[in-house]
Amino acid sequence: MKLKYLSPSVLTLSCLLLSASAIAAAPKAKALRTYTFEDCLVVGISDGDTLKARCGKPGVYEKITVRLSGIDTPERKQAYGSRARKALSDFTFGRQADLVCNAHDQYQRHVCKVMVAPLSAADGPKTLDAGLALLTVGMAWWYKAYAHEQGPQERGQYEFAEFEAKSKRAGLWADPHPVPPWEWRRNEKAQRHGG
């Protein structure tokens, strides 16, 4: 049967059934244990995916180091490293942020989604995901090795943002052969150890 002869109701039903079976077949995301810090002030930018924030009430502030979840940006000495750091600074430095965290990394940094108000509505709600924004402007890779730490919707958003940035050759994707930071770190380590 040719597709053009299907009635709209049959076509709609077929699409619904296909969607339902795809959802049922998709791997289930592991429930993540999250914790939040609200109304933190971003007080420092270490590199393109690490910042320092001051959280808590006046007089009892806690200064924490945050590694943005779901992304990896070029290292400071790597091509695009300083631009990634500047982009993170433009999105977050000196601004109030909510941190939705799910882990600590090997350096005891909190691994968090960093939410700030968009620059266009600085006094509005914190709806801008800084990691997703870095992907969108082409200053980060979606860190697929840690995709299991994201929910299905967030994984889809991050994957799509990276795909769009690549398609538009935005940021580091203008380079014909951008080197992912995990490969750059591995190569740097091998050179230091004579390999």
Image: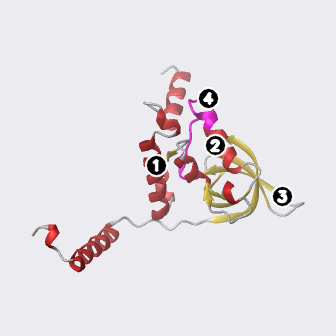
**Local secondary structure at mark 4:** loop
Check if mark 3's residue and mark 1's residue have beta carbons within 8 Å.
no
| Observer able to see residue 176 | yes
Q: Amino acid at mark 3?
A: Tyr
Bounds of the magenta span?
Answer: 69-83
**Residue 72 in magenta stretch:** yes
Marks 3 and 1, how far apart at CA: 33 Å
Mark 2: amino acid: Ala
Q: Earlier in the sequence, mark 4 or mark 3?
A: 3
Q: Earlier in the sequence, mark 4 or mark 2?
A: 4
The front one of 25 and 105 is: 25
Question: What residue would you read off at disc 3?
Answer: 61
Question: Does the residue at mark 4 contact the one at mark 2 (Cβ under 8 Å)?
Answer: no
Q: Secondary structure at mark 1?
A: helix
Give the label, 1 or 2, closer to the camera: 2
Image point (52%, 49%), residue name: 136
Name the amino acid type tagged 4: Lys
Give the mark toward the camera: 1 or 4.
Answer: 4
Q: Which label is found at residue 145?
A: 1
| Residue 50 place in picture, x, y as percent | 66, 45
Residue 132 in magenta stretch: no
In this view, the residue farthest toward the left is: 1
How much space separates mark 3 and mark 2, taking CA atoms?
A: 26 Å
What percent of the width, then of the height, locates residue 99? 67, 60
Answer yes or no: is residue 180 visible: no
Residue occupying image coordinates x 56% and y 30%: 79
Give the Cα separation between the discs numbered 4 and 3.
32 Å
- Which color mode does the image show? secondary structure
